[in-house]
Structure formats: structure tokens, C-alpha cells
Amino acid sequence: MASPPRPLSWERRAAVWDAAFAVVRAHLRGAGLREVSTPVRVAAPAAEPYIDPIAAPPGWLATSPELAMKRLLCRGSGPVFQLSHVFRRAERGDRHSEEFHLLEWYRLGSSLAAVERDVEVIVADVYAAAAEVLEHDEHHVAPPRRWIRTSFFEVFAATAGVVLRGDEDDAGLRAIVSAELRAAVWDDRPGPLTDRDPEVRTLAAWTAVFSAWSDAKLDPWLLGQVGVGVHLGEFPAGLAALAERDMQGGRAIAHRVESHVCGVELANGYRELRDADEQRRRFAAVHALRAALGEPALPTDEAFLSELASPGLPVCTGMALGLDRLIMLACGRTRLDDVTLALGAP
């Protein structure tokens, strides 16, 4: 039996990260994207119900470069990418850190397939770069042999036994999900699921059902895809986040995709929402949900909304990939601490 993987030496860590940076830049620059660098401290973070920013008065440490990069796109930057440090409060664990590297990029056009292909190339290139550095390491593993793209709706139906329409309200979801999911999500205690605001209840229901289903059904399903990378696309409209959504074949679809390797979520992409009024409504719904959760209020990025309205965001798709997780997997490790270049928590 092989021994448990040991942390990489500092020399090997430096070599792997250097090689990973090089191949990522080579691919994206070769594809015609321009590298940019936006501020780490921002006036207003992107509003997420369960992602908490770290205060850095008079602003916040960025949880993602997303809104800043979209403002560049609005101003005519053309396709861009960034390797950025991002910060998320209280995210700690083997696969989580309060500070990590987010690789984010945007292509012009509406094809999610293009950014999915980028993920496949970047994963293969980082695995190959790690293999070159770790040629005698017994824990080094092979990259996915192939990739598949499947629909959230199909996997949900196959694993939870429920056919979703995608735009159910909280009562509709509660009525159709399995008893197992119902018990995991609705306990009738005071909170966002019992809020007076129907939008709060519905957003809370979708996020809670997604979380409970992921833990109970999706994660085991993904682990069963041995040697196969998975793009999970066609999300329900109720989980659109910052993606465009529409009706297709009687389903309310969000143009969103998550990419997974070895059961680990690596990347999240959207066909980006371009409607400033709809974006404001979604931010307001998130703020209301955060209030119902008792979370501190966050400012709205009015500068972003203003530029989204005019001059406007070109048709584009974006992807964000956790580089620390990818390097961890490429090195055959199970903890970020085994590969990180962090010299110690503050």
C-alpha cells in the first residue's frame, strides 16, 4: 500500500507553481487574450449569499476580479485574463483557504464550449508541467483521460428522481423534491426559508437544495466518473447567479457551467448577464437573503452597474478556475497546504 502523500518540498513547490504560471499564460496569450491586473482592494465586492468578503477599510479585499474585469470589457479591452489573489472570510480546510489564486478569463462571443475547452487544455497542461517537476514522485497522477458535458437537469433527475422545470418557487421545490432533500433543507425554523419576502425564500430554497443535493448525490456521482473530467452545464434558472437565462424545451435554463476533476469543483463559468436592470434585481435579492441570514450588509457596486448599462458589456463568456486546487490535484495531493507557497497564516 502506498504511503500517504507528503507535502512537497519548498523547492518543488516553487518549481511547480512557476511551471503552472508559464503554461497558463502561454495558452491564454496564445488564444489571443490579454493579461490584466485589477486592484485587490475594491469599493464593493461582488454580492454572493454565502461568500463573505474581508474588510479592508475604506473598502474590501476582492473575493473575485469579476466585476473589475467586466468593467474593462465594457470599456473595450477585448478578451482578457488575470491570475489574481482573492480573499474569502472563514474559508478554511483541506480544499479551502481565505486567500487563494483565481484564474479568471473572458472570451468574446456566446460559446461556453470555448471556455470549457480552455479548462480542458489548462488542466492537461498543468498536469504535464507538474509531472515534469515531479517525475520521481510516486503520488503524481494522470490527468483526465477524457471530458464529458452533461446537464444539471439530467444528473439531478438521475440521482434525485425529480424532473425540474428550473424556475420553481420555494413551495414548488418543496413539493417535488425527495423526502431526503426536503428533510435536509426545510426544518421550519425561522430564517430565510420562512422569510416574508417570496424572492428571499425562493433564492434560499434553490441554494439550499443545490447544497444538500451536491453533498448527498452529486459528489458521489462525480467520484464515480473515474478518469473523466465533467462539465456540468445547463443549470436551472433559479441558480443563474450572474449568468444569462432563458427558456429551452420547456425548461428555464441558466447558461452556467461547473467543471470538475476527481470529484473536485475546479471552475465555474457563465454566458455573462448583460442586462443592468436584471443585474441590479439579482444583487438586491442576494442582499435581502444576506439580511435574512443575519449577515452584514454589503455595498452595491454602482460603478459596475453604471458601465453595464452604458457603454454596456459585449456578448461574452467567462470562466473562473481555482489554480491552487488544480495544482493540488496535478501533484497527487489532497490538501492545499501540501502545495501552497503561503509561508504561514497571518
Image: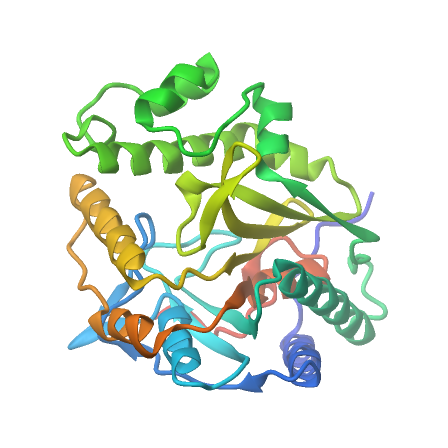
Give the side of residue 148 with respect to residue 1, left or right. Answer: left
Give me the residue at 66% from left, 33% from top. Answer: 221
Tell me: residue 198, above or below residue 290: above
Where residue 344 sits, quadrant-wise, is bottom left
The foreground one among 43 and 176 is 176
Q: Residue 305 appears at what percent x and percent y?
A: 26, 69
Q: Residue 122 appears at what percent x and percent y?
A: 70, 69
The foreground one among 333 and 220 is 220
Give the side of residue 224 with respect to residue 236, left or right. Answer: right
Give me the residue at 29% from left, 78% from top. Answer: 41
How many numbered marks have been drawn onto this rendered protein structure?
Answer: 0
Q: Is residue 52 visible?
A: no
Tell me: residue 59, above or below residue 1: below
Give the side of residue 5 with respect to residue 284, left or right. Answer: right
Give the side of residue 310 with respect to residue 216, left or right. Answer: left
Q: Residue 290 appears at what percent x and percent y?
A: 22, 46
Give me the residue at 82% from left, 75% from top. Answer: 132
> As drawn, which residue projects farthest toward the top?
179
Q: How is the image coloured?
A: rainbow
